[in-house]
Amino acid sequence: MSSLTELENTISTNPDQITISQFLSTIKNVISDMEEKKDESEMKKISTLMKWKNIQSYIQYLINMGIEGKELDENQRQNLYLIIYILQSIYNYSGLETGVSDSDYDRLYELLNQEGEDLVSTPIVSGNVRHHRYRSLRGTLEKVYSLTEEDKMANKSRKSLDQWLDEKERMLYEKTGEHYDLHHVPIYVFPKWDGVSIIFEFNEKNELEYALTRGNTDTNEAQDVTFVFAPIQSRIKDKQRTGYPYGLKTEVMMTITDLGKCNRESDEEYKNTRSVISSIVNGHEVDDRINYLDVVRLRTSTLNADGTETLQELASNAFQRPYLVCNMDNREAIKKFAYDHTFVDGLRCDGAVIYIQDENLRKLLGRKNHKNQYEVAFKFNEEIAHTKITGITFSVTPFGNIFPVANFEVRNMKGNAVQNVSLGSIARFNELHLAVGDSVKILYEIIPYLVYDENDPKCNRSGNTPIPLPEFCPECGHIITYNEKRTAASCTNPDCSCRKRGKLLNYATKLGLDWFGEETINTLYEADILTDITDFYKLPEKHDQIVALDKFGETKYQNLVESVIKNGTRISADKFMGAIGIENIGAKTFAKIFERYTILELLEFADDMKVSKLSDIPGIADITAAKILKGIKDEKKMIKKLIEKYVFLYFEAKSGDAKFIAVFHKIRSKLLTEKMKAVGGEVEDNLTKKTSFLIVPNDYDGNSSTGEKARKYDCPIVKIDDVPEYVQNKFGLTI
C-alpha cells in the first residue's frame, strides 16, 4: 500500500483485501514521512480513515479485551501501539476528530501500559524541540472512576478511590515503616479542567521564556510553542512571582461560546474545544484565535540557586476558582462538587482533582512515573442522554449464550449515533423490566450503558406490558434452555449457524489469520466453503468457488490461503488449544497444562473426564478442569484430525529450562522471537533480575526508565541488529 489514496480506494471497493495491521502500518508510514512539515489534507484523510467501521470495531474489540482482563498477542500489541501513535499524531497535528472518545483513548493507553511497556510517547510534530527545566510539572494525573467500592455504576475493571488510597498507604508503609490512614485526611477538591496541557517557563524578570507541550516524559523532549503564546503572556504569568525563575503548569481552555465564534470566523466545524485549541497550538504561525483562549494556572515550581527544583505547589490563583475543603471520607460531597462543576465560567470539566492538604504527606508520597502521588482525578461518565425504548433483540454468542440488546430512539453521543445497547445478561434484563415506550437514561463512558433511574424525573414507565423472554433461538429457532432461576439462557443446538460462525471467527482471531474478518467468514460460511475449523486448511481445493464470490477474486483467494499457511500450520500447542473455542479458556491456561502433560494425554483424560489430573495444577479449579475436559471431548474428533493432518504443534520451553530470557523494549519482532525460542530461549514481557538481556531499537539512546532498571540489574542492553551475534558469542547458539 503506497498512499492514503490507494487505502481509501481499497476500503471503498474491496475492504476485505486489507488487514488491520496493513491499514495501521500504512498510516503510520505516511505520518512518519511527514517529518517536520505537516500536510493538512493528508491529516484530514487520516482522520476520516480512522473512522472506518472495521478499525473502530477493532478498537472496541481491544478495549473489551482490556475490560475482561484478557492478554493481547504480539500482533494485537503492535496494532495497539500503532493505534495510539496515530491517534496522538492526529491530535497533535490538527486536533481533528478521530472517532475515538477521550475515555476510550484512556482505555487504550491503560491497556498498552498493562501489556508491560510504555511504548508510546506524545509524537513530536515540530523540529523546534526543547527540554523541560521544570520536570515536576510534567505528566498526568492518576485516575479513578468510582468513589467507593459499592458504586455499582462504575466500571468494575477500573480503580476506585479506595483502591488508590490503599496503594498510597502501602507506599508510605514501605517508605517509613509506619501505618497511615489516608481514608480520612483533609483534602482540597478542584475541578478537573478538560483542555490542553502547556507548561510555561518564566525568567527572574517574570518574562516568558518558553511555552512547552507535555511532550515525551521519557526523554524530556517537548514541542516549543512559545511563539503561539507570546502575544498573550501578560494574561498567563503569575504577577506575584518576581525576582526568581519559575515554571507554571496550565490547562489551556476555550468556552463553548468562543468555540462557536472560532468556527464562524475560520469557516471550520470543530466539534469540541480541544480540537480547535490543538489546531492553534500546533500551527506554524501566530493565530488570531489565540485571543479566545483561557489559561487556567494549576501548579508552580521554582529553581534553586544550584539549578535544582523545589517541590511544586498550587498556583497562587487556585483558590480564586471553585474548590472544596473536606475530609477524604466525605464521598457524597466530593461527588456533588464534581457534578456541580462540569462547567466553570463556560469552561468544560470532566471530573474533580482530589489533593491531599498535609504538606508532610505530600513530601513523603512525592512523585513516581511522572505523576504526583498525593493527588488523583475522579472522572465520571462524560455524556448522559435520555431516550425511549423501541424494542429488545436477542443475540447469540459463539458459545450459544443468549444476551439481550435494548433498542431505542437514536441519540447522538460522543459523535456517534447510538440506538442500541447490550444489557449484558438475562439477569439484568429481568431486573430492568423494560417495555416499549419506557423512558430510560444512557450513560456513555467506555461503551454505552442503559439504566432506569427511579430518582431521575426524565425516566418513567410507559405502562405497556414488559417485553417477555424469548422461547426460541433467534438464529436457528431451536428451543432455548434456561437455568432454574431464568437468569441465563443458551441455545444448545450444536448446528446453530451463529455458534459455528463464532467458532470460526474465534479460531482465526486467536491465531492471527489475517484477511479472515467477520464479513469474510460469514460469506464463506453462507457459501458452504467454511463450515468448521478443518475447512481453513481445505481452501486450496476451493479456488474456483472462492474467486467467483462477490468482492473476492484471485488476489483475495491468494491472501486467504497464504494467511492460513503462514499463521495456521505451525502453532504453539497452548495457542492452538486456546483457539479451539472452549469458553473462557485461553492459551495461558493451556500453557500451564502443557508444562505437565502432552496434548495426547489431554485427549485421553477427556475420554474418562479425569478432572483431578488438571485440578492438581495451581490455578485450575475443579469446575475449570471439568469445563476444559468437556470442551476437549466435544471437539476431540476435530482436534485429532487437525494435529494428524494439518497442523504441526510445538511446545514452548519452560522458563526454568530456558537457555536465556530476553525482553523487548520499545520494539517487537515476531521473527526474532521465533528464532530465539527455536534455540531454547524465552521471551518475556517484563524486565526482572532473571532477564538475560534487553533488546532495544538500533537508535536507542539509553534514556528510559526500563533502561535504568536494566543497568540497576546489570542486565546487558543489546540493539536488535546485534542480537544474533550476541546470542552466538554469549550462549553459543545460532539464530
Image (tube, helix red, strand yellow):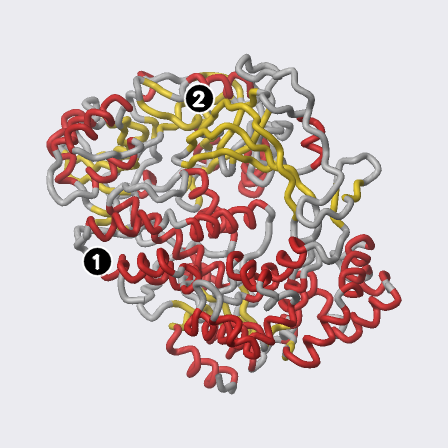
**Closer to viewer: mark 1 or mark 2:** 1
Q: Which quarter of the figure has residue 540?
A: bottom right
- Quarter placement of the N terminus: bottom left
Q: Position of residue 353 (x, y in %)?
A: 43, 27
Say which quarter of the image contains residue 102.
top left
Report helix, strand or loop for mark 1.
helix
Amino acid type, callout 1: Met
Name which residue type carries label 2: Tyr
Towards the viewer: 231 or 384: 384
Where is residue 302, by image quadrant?
A: top left
Q: Is residue 582 left or right of residue 249?
A: right
* Residue with the most extreme top position: 457
SS of the residue under disc 2: strand
**Residue shown at 43%/54% (left/top)?**
118
Give the residue at mark 2. Answer: 188
Q: Is residue 605 left or right of residue 387?
A: right
- Name the residue beneath numbered marker 1: 34
Is residue 315 shown above or below 510? above
